[in-house]
Structures are given as structure tokens and as C-alpha cells.
Amino acid sequence: MNLFMRWTGILVVIFIAAPLVIVVPMSFSSANSLQFPPPGYWLGYYRAYFTNPDWLIPTWNSILIATATTILTMVLVVPATFALVRHKFRGKSFADLMMLMPLAVPHIVMAVGYYSYLGDLGLVHSHLGVILAHTCLSVPIAFLVLSANLKGFDRNLERAAQSLGASPTKTFMHITLPILRPGLIISALFAFVQSFDETVVAIFISGRDAATLPRKMFDSIRQEADPVIAVISTLLFFLVLIGIAAPYFISALRSRAPKPSRPAGAH
């Protein structure tokens, strides 16, 4: 039974990872379109990506929009999470529901609503419009992660600090914030990825000046299946791998670091 489960797990991993792995050799292909196996190999499409403003501008747009979305999301989510998790007030259940509503509504429905609402405000085809729309989509994800961390937080630590004379501000900065730091980082990371990867809303709102990288990739594959798409997919794939491997690498370095020796006579 254990052998069967092991091979089943291996087959599932292969099934999921195969499309990702296939993209890598396609990014070095010499074909004029997306083709596997490649008829030949070269670096021309990497050069085309790093030298073509039609690709670089959407990339910078995506980084700028995702960064601004992350900052705005955390500014909204942190106080909202503390209010909803730690306090009781009338309408709390409704507020919880509204925080999670974007997860339940299809993105195409949200995109149409944002297009109509932001159009009345003159924010369609602008960076600010995309940032606001992406923030609405990122808030529930960041809220779920941070609320899970906050619900497991031991408030006796805060009470102990305040009983020793620490002000609420010092308690938050020196006790609450360090303990919740991993949850805050993960929430911010999810908000960034959600914004950077979002396509449907960007198609409706971004326009030419604020076009994001996913929208540019969608337009390209719909019109001509440009192999540069495989280059971008490969770069993003390796960035994700680096992000996954980095904590393990840092942990391994820390475990191998020499520990400070005790002074003579110390017990």
C-alpha cells in the first residue's frame, strides 16, 4: 500500500510539473512559434525580451502595480484584521462576509463591475485604477492568512508586557509585531503574487498605458503565439523556485555557522 501511494504521488507530481518543465526548452527554441520539441536552440528570444520595450514596459508596470497593491492591501488589512478578530461589534459577521466576498465572485463579474465603477471615476486605463481593483482582489487572501495567525496569538504575552509597564505602542512594536512578522510577510507575498498574476481585471481596466505583463502575454498568445512568452514563463518559474529554495538555503547556512564559544569558567 505504501509503495502504491508513493508511486501515485510521484505520478501526480509529474502530471502537475510536466507543463512547467516543457516551457523551459521551448524558451530556447529557434522556432518561429511555440513548438515542442524545439527544432533547434538559441538565445534570440531572451534577447528579444530584454531589449524590447513592448515587453519591458508591461513588466515594470506589473512590478509597480503589484508593489503598490501590496502596500495598500497591508495598510487596509492589518487594522481590519485586528478589529474583526479581537473585537465584537454589531455587523461583524457582515463585515467578515464582505472581506471574503471577492473570493466567491467570479473575476469576470468583478472585472465588469470595476470597469463600470472606475469608468465613472475616470480611472479606467490608469495605473491607479488597476491598483485599486487589484487591492480589492488581494484583501481577502491577505486577510485569511493574517487572521489565522492572529487567532493563534497568545495575548498573555501582551498582558505580561503591559503589566511590566510597556505602553500599548511598545507592546505592539516589541511583542505583537515580531511574533506576527511571518504572517505579515506571507500576507504581503500573497497580495503581491495575486496582483502580479491577475489577468481578467487587467484586460478590462489597464489599457495600453497601464498594460500588465499577464495582459501582454494574453494578447501576444492570442495574436501570434510569440515564443517570448516561453521566456517569461521560464524566468517566472525559476524565480518561484528560488523563492521556495531560499528559506531552506538560509536555514542550512545558519545551521552550519559556528556557534559562539562560551568564555572559560562559564556554566
Image (spheres, rainbow, N blue to C red):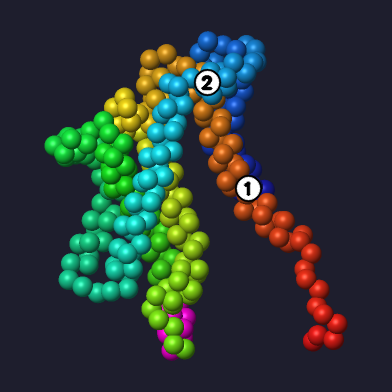
Q: Does residue 231 appear in the picture of this structure?
A: yes
Residue drawn at (23%, 56%), measured in percent from left and top?
98
Magenta stretch contains residue 154: yes
Span colored in magenta: 153-163
- Please rate how many residues cluster around mark 1, counting C-alpha atoms within 10 Å: few if below 14, some from 14 to 19, many from 20: few
Q: Quadrant of residue 153?
A: bottom left
* Image coords of residue 38 (percent x, y): 61, 15
Viewer-side residue, 116 vs 162: 162
Give the side of residue 157 with respect to residue 38, left or right: left
Give the side of residue 73 with respect to residue 189, left or right: left
**Disc assigned to residue 95:** none
- Please rate how many residues cluster around mark 2, counting C-alpha atoms within 10 Å: few if below 14, some from 14 to 19, many from 20: few
Q: Is residue 18 above or below residue 117?
A: above
Give the side of residue 139 with respect to residue 8, left or right: left
Magenta stretch contains residue 160: yes
The amino acid marked with disc number 2 is Thr
For the C terminus, give its image quadrant: bottom right
Label 2, on which residue? 51
Viewer-side residue, 61 vs 180: 61
* Image coords of residue 230 (percent x, y): 53, 24
Q: Secondary structure at mark 2?
A: helix
Q: Is residue 141 above or below residue 123?
A: below
Label 1, on which residue? 245
Q: Secondary structure at mark 1?
A: helix
Which residue is most to the left?
120
Residue drawn at (31%, 42%), measured in percent from left and top?
131
Q: Does residue 37 appear in the picture of this structure?
A: no
Q: Is residue 199 above or below residue 195?
A: above
